[in-house]
Image (cartoon, grey):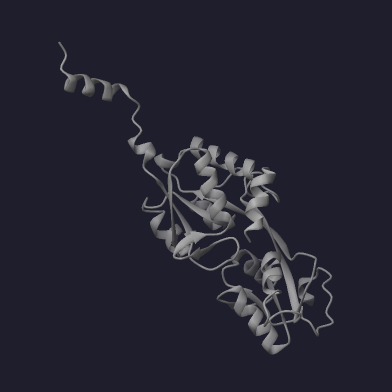
C-alpha cells in the first residue's frame, strides 16, 4: 500500500512546474514625473502607461512587479544584469534597440503593438504673433525641451538647431511665461493640463500642427523569463486594450 506522503510526492512530480512561471516578472518604469503617462502616486508607479501594462499582464494571467527607477539605471545596469525583465514607456531608438526587444514594427509610424502614440506640440507666449508653418528653423529661440524627451532633442540637434533643456515640463512653462519670449515643446495632453493651472492659464498658445508624433512601447530584455511567445502575448494584449473602447474611455476619464 502506497503511503499518503509517497503519493503526494509522486503527484507533485506529475503537476506542471509553475513555480518559476508564477514568480513575478520585474518591470521598471522611469521615476520621473511625466503626467499622465508615468509618475508616482504615494510612492507607487502610476499613469496611463503603467495601468495599461498592469491590465495587459492581468488579462494574460502573468504576475508582475513594477518598480520606479531612473530609466538609464534600469536599461544600462539592472536590465543587463538580469534584475529587470522589461521596461515601460520607451520610444524606439537605435541605442535602445541594441539592449531591448521591441515589436517587429517598432520603426513604423504607427506601430500596432505600441502602448500609445504621443503628439508633441509647439507652445509660445500668448503675446507672440508667431505662427508655426512646420519649419523648425523658424521656431523662436530659446526652444525649451524637457531633457527626458531625448528623441525630440536629437531631432532638433540633427537639424543643427540648439535647444535649452529643463528637468520637466512645468519648468519649461515657468520659464516661457517668466521671460515672455521663445518657445517650448511639450505633449498635447500636458499643454491642456497646465493650461488649466491658474499661474499658466491664458498665458500661452498651443500650435495645432505637431512637431512630432512618437510611439511608446513596453520593451523586454532578452531572458528565459520573457521569451518571444510571452512578449508577443503581452503586445497582443496591449493592442487589444487600445481597441477596447470601454477600457480606454475609463482610463482617459481618470486623467
- In the current view of this chain or complex, which residue is farthest to the bottom? 179
Residue shown at the point (41%, 41%) measured from the top left: 225
Residue 11 in sight: yes
Left or right, 112 with reference to 6? right
Query: Where residue 139 sits: x, y (%)?
Result: 76, 77
Left or right, 26 with reference to 53? left
Residue 166 or 247: which is nearer the viewer?
A: 247
Query: Where residue 102 sits: x, y (%)?
Result: 56, 47
In this rendering, the answer to whether 253 lies above or below 24 is below
Residue 63 or 26: which is nearer the viewer?
A: 63
Q: Residue 34, located in which quarter of the rendered image?
A: bottom right
In this rendering, the answer to whether 116 lies above or below 193 is above
In this rendering, the answer to whether 122 lies above or below 202 is above
Query: Where residue 162 sits: x, y (%)?
Result: 66, 78
Query: Where residue 204 sits: x, y (%)?
Result: 75, 79
Residue shown at the point (84%, 70%) measured from the top left: 133
Amino acid at each position: 500500500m502506497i503511503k499518503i506522503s509517497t503519493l503526494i510526492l509522486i503527484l507533485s512530480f506529475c503537476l506542471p512546474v509553475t513555480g518559476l512561471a508564477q514568480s513575478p516578472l520585474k518591470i521598471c518604469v522611469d521615476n520621473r514625473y511625466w503626467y499622465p503617462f508615468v509618475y508616482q502616486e504615494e510612492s507607487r508607479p502610476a499613469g496611463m502607461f503603467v495601468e495599461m501594462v498592469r491590465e495587459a499582464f492581468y488579462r494574460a494571467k502573468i504576475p508582475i512587479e513594477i518598480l520606479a527607477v531612473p530609466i538609464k539605471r534600469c536599461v544600462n545596469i539592472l536590465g543587463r544584469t538580469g534584475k529587470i525583465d522589461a521596461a515601460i514607456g520607451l520610444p524606439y531608438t537605435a541605442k535602445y534597440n541594441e539592449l531591448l526587444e521591441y515589436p517587429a514594427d517598432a520603426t513604423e509610424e504607427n506601430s500596432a503593438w505600441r502602448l500609445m502614440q504621443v503628439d508633441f506640440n509647439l507652445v509660445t507666449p500668448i503675446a507672440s504673433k508667431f505662427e508655426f508653418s512646420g519649419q523648425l528653423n523658424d521656431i523662436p529661440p530659446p526652444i525649451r525641451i524637457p531633457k527626458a524627451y531625448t528623441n525630440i532633442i536629437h531631432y532638433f540637434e540633427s537639424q543643427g538647431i540648439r535647444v535649452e533643456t529643463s528637468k520637466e515640463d512645468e519648468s519649461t512653462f515657468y520659464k516661457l511665461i517668466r521671460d515672455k519670449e521663445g518657445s517650448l515643446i511639450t505633449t498635447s495632453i500636458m499643454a491642456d493640463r497646465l493650461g488649466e493651472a491658474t499661474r499658466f492659464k491664458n498665458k500661452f498658445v498651443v500650435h495645432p500642427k505637431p512637431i512630432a508624433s512618437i510611439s511608446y512601447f513596453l520593451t523586454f530584455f532578452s531572458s528565459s523569463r520573457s521569451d518571444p511567445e510571452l512578449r508577443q502575448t503581452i503586445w497582443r494584449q496591449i493592442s487589444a486594450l487600445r481597441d477596447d473602447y470601454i477600457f480606454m474611455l475609463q482610463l482617459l476619464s481618470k486623467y
